[in-house]
């Protein structure tokens, strides 16, 4: 960071070496966290007797920036939840019914939509670090409720789970956008913003490693038969039952929740906050939200990126939620489900490197065409339900989510100013969740129609066979529906970008991000 200067003592006299760091005609002086940039332009006052050759500044690793390292640690700890591989059956084993589980999902969807954008605006108002600490605290409370709730009173159990889902959504909304914006601005201030692609690459790789460990370990420790074999092998002589293993994944997640909170407390944010009351802060947050929304709809390239991400994310995520049913119908043993989820996560070690090179050397249009072809191939392959070999198109489709996440983050951060970055990223999350909810409703209607039609044609089918047949028939709708919506998106985007070249431009890695 360049020290502040005074009128009486020009910076170039006080530190002649620093005068040649960066561009002589535009010296940026420590932008604060609110995004206010002070620039000293065309500094003409310099010692006339001193002539120096420009000195190159040593390259600074983006991972030497403390907030960048903590951002990666936060993403790993916040998302590595040991109960993910057994998420749905865990609620049922606690004693909830299927209808209660459906209600909890509805509560989750409603809460995330209500909290997503206001949390981003608050991050830009009260500080990203403060909101991340709040997210870490909510995660601790959320998991602690789950870990210690008594199972004897089913009514109390249900309402505790309702509170758990609300706190889970609030924590996710508070973290959404704020962590990324804090790390991005820290890199912009202390390092080279063109290294953001490297940061995303490393973050996805570490997060994938954490996901693999959590998925594999959580599934193994939840299985009483597997845990019994382990305890017998090491001579512990314990009797392992379902009651023994029920909360083990939750206890492990409670440990990571505590580490998540500690990580946020170690973050630092150089931001001069207005000492205003809560009413003024709320008004400021609302103003930022409205301004960011207007800016998104007035910026064609950003709007197209968000709409493309919405289309891919909502449909592919819907297929991800049904992956276990798909694996069962292609004859994959259930014991391998967790391994397959981990296999998808392992793709996160490879795909980010490829995505970074594509973002540096290919245009956004090229990258959109590439992920579109991968998505169509994956959906089409899954619709054939090839025994065992159907794993390959599933991996192709689910691995494509890593490309999507990288490209959306890269292009949105590149196009958005610091002042509203967290709010814009939260808008992205809001749009994605709204799209996912809408696709879920449409898919439910489709299943209802297909079920009635199948019953009319084959009334003798048993319930389990009927459910499987309806699911197989529904998969045929995904490739065609996606292709049709993609064509609509392409024509709409071409119309929006008719006076722009940004979607056809290849990023210049040597050019500062703010000038692209």
Image: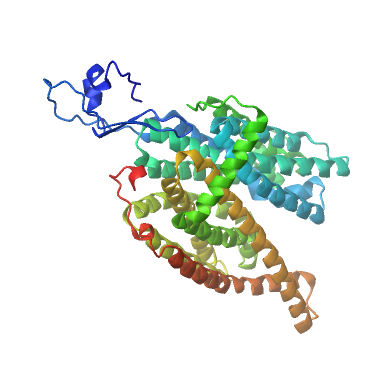
Q: Is the residue 369 above or below the residue 146 in the image?
A: below
Q: Quarter-wise, where is residue 116 in the image?
A: top right
Residue closest to the eye, 371 or 84: 371
Quarter of the image with the N terminus is: top left
Image spot of residue 106 (x, y percent): 74, 53
User: Compared to 139, does 379 lie above or below?
Assistant: below
Residue at screen point 59% across, 54% down? 431
Q: How is the image coloured?
A: rainbow
Q: Is residue 79 visible?
A: no
**Residue 4, image x and y in percent?**
35, 21
Q: Nearer the viewer, residue 267 or 514?
A: 514
Which image quarter: residue 247? top right
Give percent across and percent down for residue 415.
42, 48
Residue at (21%, 28%) from the top-left corner?
44
Side of 237 relative to 485 (left or right): right
* Residue displayed at 26% across by 30% down: 58
Front residue (pair 148, 44): 44
Q: Position of residue 129 (x, y in %)?
A: 55, 31
């Amino acid at each position: 960071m360049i020290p502040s200067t005074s009128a009486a003592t020009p910076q170039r006299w006080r530190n002649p070496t620093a005068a040649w760091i960066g561009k002589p005609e535009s010296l940026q002086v420590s932008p604060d966290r609110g995004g206010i940039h002070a620039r000293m332009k065309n500094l003409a006052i310099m010692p006339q007797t001193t002539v120096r050759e420009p000195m190159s500044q040593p390259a600074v690793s983006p991972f030497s920036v403390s907030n960048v390292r903590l951002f990666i640690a936060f993403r790993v700890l916040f998302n590595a939840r040991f109960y993910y591989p057994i998420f749905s059956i865990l609620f049922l084993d606690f004693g909830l019914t299927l209808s209660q589980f459906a209600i909890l999902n509805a509560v989750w969807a409603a809460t995330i939509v209500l909290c997503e954008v206001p949390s981003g605006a608050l991050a830009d108002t009260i500080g990203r670090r403060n909101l991340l600490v709040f997210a870490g605290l909510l995660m601790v409370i959320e998991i602690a409720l789950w870990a210690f709730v008594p199972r004897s009173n089913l009514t109390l159990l249900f309402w505790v789970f309702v509170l758990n889902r609300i706190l889970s959504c609030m924590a996710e909304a508070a973290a959404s956008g704020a962590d990324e914006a804090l790390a991005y601005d820290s890199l912009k201030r202390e390092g080279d913003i063109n290294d953001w692609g490297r940061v995303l690459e490393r973050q996805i790789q570490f997060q994938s490693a954490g996901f693999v460990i959590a998925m594999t370990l959580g599934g193994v420790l939840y299985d009483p038969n597997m845990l019994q074999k382990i305890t017998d092998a090491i001579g512990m002589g314990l009797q392992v039952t379902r009651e023994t293993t029920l909360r083990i994944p939750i206890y492990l997640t409670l440990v990571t929740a505590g580490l998540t909170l500690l990580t946020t407390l170690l973050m630092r944010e150089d931001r001069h906050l207005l000492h205003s009351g809560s009413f003024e802060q709320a008004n400021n947050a609302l103003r930022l939200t409205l301004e960011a929304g207007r800016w998104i709809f007035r910026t064609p390239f950003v709007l197209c990126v968000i709409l493309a991400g919405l289309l891919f994310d909502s449909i592919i995520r819907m297929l991800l939620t049904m992956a276990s049913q798909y694996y069962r119908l292609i004859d994959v043993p259930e014991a391998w489900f967790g391994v397959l989820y981990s296999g998808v996560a392992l793709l996160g070690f490879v795909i980010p490197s490829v995505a970074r090179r594509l973002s540096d050397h290919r245009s956004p249009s090229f990258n959109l065409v590439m992920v579109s072809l991968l998505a169509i191939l994956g959906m089409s392959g899954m619709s054939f339900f090839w025994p065992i070999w159907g794993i390959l198109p599933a991996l192709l489709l689910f691995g494509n989510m890593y490309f999507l996440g990288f490209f959306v983050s890269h292009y949105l951060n590149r196009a958005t100013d610091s002042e509203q970055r967290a709010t814009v990223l939260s808008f992205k999350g809001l749009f994605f969740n709204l799209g996912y909810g809408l696709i879920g409703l449409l898919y439910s209607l489709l299943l209802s129609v297909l079920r009635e039609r199948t019953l009319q044609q084959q009334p003798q089918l048993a319930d389990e066979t009927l459910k499987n047949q309806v699911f197989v028939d529904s998969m045929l709708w995904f490739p065609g529906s996606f292709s049709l919506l993609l064509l609509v998106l392409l024509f709409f985007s071409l119309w929006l970008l008719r006076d722009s070249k940004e979607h056809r431009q290849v990023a210049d890695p040597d050019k500062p991000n703010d000038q692209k």
